[in-house]
Amino acid sequence: MSTPSPTEERLRAALDARARLIDAHDLSPYRPPTGPAWGRRRIRRVVSAVAVTLAAAAAVAFLLLSGSPDRPRPAPPARDPRTSPPATPVPSSNPGPPTRPSPTSPPATPPPTSTSVPTQP
């Protein structure tokens, strides 16, 4: 074991002198702290929990009551818009002048194309 340095000896002597100044009368018996039973932090936690609970209840009530049957709901489409039946001409019982196909409908037969190949004499 090494010998203590002069600084360490002085520090120990100062602490020992300070400890001798305190006697049993200076020490008080243990008493529980007095003051409010509820701390501010505890009150804040309870208020926060109540506020969150009320907000959640209000959100649930809004969602349940917003779907009231008084509002008309949009009617579903009569048929599926993605699939449309092919357009078939309806035969007419009245013979009349022949009808020309509309410009939007495809022709029944492809138009003749001229594929003339030039020949060399």
Image: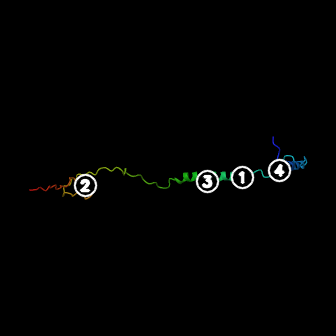
Residue designated by label 1? 41
Q: Which of marks 1 and 2 is nearer the N terminus?
A: 1
Colouring used for the render: rainbow
Q: How many neighbours does mark 3 have within 10 angstroms: few (below 14), some (14-19), or many (20 or more)?
A: few
Q: Which residue type does callout 1 highlight?
A: Arg
Q: Disc 4 or disc 1, which is closer to the eye?
A: 4
Residue designated by label 2? 106
Distance Cα–Cα, label 2 vs label 4: 110 Å
Q: State the residue at coordinates (66%, 53%).
A: 48
Q: Can you give x and y, in whole percent of width and height, for residue 47 in the image?
A: 68, 53
Q: How many neighbours does mark 1 have within 10 angstroms: few (below 14), some (14-19), or many (20 or more)?
A: few
Q: Which residue type does callout 3 highlight?
A: Ala
Please state the total of marks drawn on the protein image.
4
Q: State the residue at coordinates (61%, 53%).
A: 55
Distance Cα–Cα, label 3 vs label 1: 21 Å
Residue 9 visible in the current orientation? yes
Distance Cα–Cα, label 3 vs label 4: 65 Å
Q: Disc 3 or disc 4, which is closer to the eye?
A: 4
Q: Can you give x and y, in whole percent of width and height, for residue 16 in the image?
A: 87, 47
Please say if the residues under marks 4 and 1 sit with CB atoms less than 8 Å apart: no
Q: Which residue type does callout 2 highlight?
A: Pro
Identify the secondary structure beneath mark 3: helix
Residue designated by label 4? 7
Q: In which quarter of the image is the C terminus?
A: bottom left
Please say if the residues under marks 3 and 4 sit with CB atoms less than 8 Å apart: no
Please say if the residues under marks 2 and 4 sit with CB atoms less than 8 Å apart: no
Distance Cα–Cα, label 1 vs label 2: 80 Å
Q: Which of marks 3 and 2 is nearer the N terminus?
A: 3
Identify the secondary structure beneath mark 2: loop
Residue 55 has which mark? 3
